[in-house]
Image: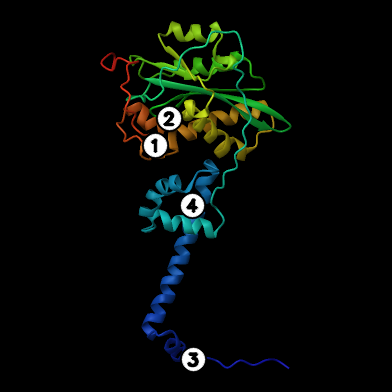
């Protein structure tokens, strides 16, 4: 025998909820509108994630501003967090560290010239680093040279060995792409064997670029380089999953273009690296100011 349940009239339901009929209909319409808005935003987020697979919610909120205006959507950052959390679209980071630095060698090492100092313009400081990238059953090694002020990737190269020649190729690309060659420039890296050979340091010398290296081996001594390497690896390459060096090389070119041209950065006030670099935008830096007075760069020269 079927169970029968007494029906509840709309008037009775409104009375139980403490609502008028008009308020009940209004709440229902608002609920439907909110649901439809959330679904619209979720679909746009999925579209953006096809280019930036692991971009965080704060950057997504910035990228969505034009979409919000076009669809008359009012959604704050916290509401976007809640919406993506409900859809299980938040990014969770898993950190695993593999050392690519071999600093126990006989080659000349250089002092740290930039500790406690930060650049005031693009191409006053370049930072370089290497990271590993899983590729099928092997590892590839990604070398980047990044402009510290704008966070623009100036040069890059990916290879299946850690030989110094691959770092040099990234440096050569960076040199070829300089937009502000009159700025006094420092190149900062760890003390890895790839950055110490005369073939690398000599190239820096030919372009009047001063050399700076970390001393302690602490990743924080080259934090910007570590951060950018992590973005390219974890937000992009890891999700596309190249299966060989040829695929990874072609993919890296597209990834760097997306990163430089279209990915906003919290530390440069949600601007893109290319915009800050090309226009020499004065941004309110997110790093802490050091009390130490910088003496390594003549700020009045070539600016």
Compared across the picture, whether 218 is left or right of 280 comes to right
Q: How far separated are the C-alphas under marks 1 and 2?
A: 9 Å
Quadrant of the frame with the C terminus: top left
Whichever of labels 2 and 4 marks the residue nearer the N terminus, that label is 4
Which circle, 2 or 3, is nearer the viewer? 2
Protein image colouring: rainbow
In which quadrant of the rendered view does residue 244 lie? top right
- Counting the numbered discs, the total is 4
Disc 1 + disc 2, Cβ < 8 Å? yes
Q: Residue at x 48, y 26 (%)?
A: 222
Compared across the picture, whether 166 is left or right of 291 comes to right
- In the picture of the structure, the residue carrying the numbered disc 1 is 267
Q: Residue at x 67, y 22 (%)?
A: 160
Whichever of labels 1 and 3 marks the residue nearer the N terminus, that label is 3
Q: Which mark is residue 151?
A: 2
Which circle, 2 or 4, is nearer the viewer? 2
Query: How far from the left and from the top, in percent, is residue 203?
Result: 49, 8
Disc 1 + disc 4, Cβ < 8 Å? no
In the rendered image of this protein, does residue 219 appear above or below residue 162?
below
Q: How far separated are the C-alphas under marks 4 and 3?
A: 40 Å
* Crowding near the residue tagged with mark 3, few <14, some 14–19, many ≥20 C-alpha atoms within 10 Å: few
Q: Nearer the viewer, residue 131 or 10?
A: 131
- In the picture of the structure, the residue carrying the numbered disc 3 is 9
Whichever of labels 2 and 3 marks the residue nearer the N terminus, that label is 3
* Crowding near the residue tagged with mark 2, few <14, some 14–19, many ≥20 C-alpha atoms within 10 Å: many
Q: How far separated are the C-alphas under marks 2 and 4?
A: 26 Å
């Amino acid at each position: 025998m079927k169970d029968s349940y007494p029906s509840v009239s709309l008037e009775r339901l409104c009375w139980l909820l403490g609502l008028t009929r008009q308020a009940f209909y209004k709440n229902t319409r608002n609920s439907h509108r909110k649901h439809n808005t959330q679904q619209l935003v979720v679909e746009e987020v999925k579209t953006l994630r096809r280019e930036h697979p692991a971009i965080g919610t704060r950057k997504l909120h910035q990228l969505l501003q034009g979409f919000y205006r076009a669809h008359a959507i009012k959604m704050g950052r916290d509401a976007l967090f809640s919406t993506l959390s409900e859809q299980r679209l938040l990014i969770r980071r898993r950190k695993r560290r593999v050392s690519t630095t071999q600093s126990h060698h006989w080659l000349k090492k250089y002092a740290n010239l930039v500790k406690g100092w930060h650049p005031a313009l693009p191409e006053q400081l370049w930072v370089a680093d290497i990271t590993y990238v899983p590729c099928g059953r092997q590892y590839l090694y990604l070398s980047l040279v990044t402009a510290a002020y704008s966070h623009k990737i100036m040069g890059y190269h990916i290879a299946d060995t850690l030989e110094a020649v691959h770092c040099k190729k990234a440096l050569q690309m960076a040199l070829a792409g300089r937009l502000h060659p009159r700025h006094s420039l420092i190149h900062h890296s760890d003390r890895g064997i790839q950055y110490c050979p005369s073939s690398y340091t000599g190239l820096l010398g030919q372009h009047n670029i001063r050399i700076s290296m970390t001393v302690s081996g602490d990743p924080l001594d080259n934090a910007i380089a570590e951060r950018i390497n992590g973005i390219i690896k974890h937000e992009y390459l890891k999700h596309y999953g190249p299966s060989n060096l040829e695929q990874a090389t072609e993919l890296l070119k597209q990834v760097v273009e997306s990163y430089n041209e279209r990915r906003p950065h919290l530390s440069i006030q949600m601007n893109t690296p290319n915009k800050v670099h090309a226009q020499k935008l004065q941004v309110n830096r997110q790093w802490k100011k050091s009390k130490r007075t910088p003496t390594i760069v003549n700020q009045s020269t070539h600016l």
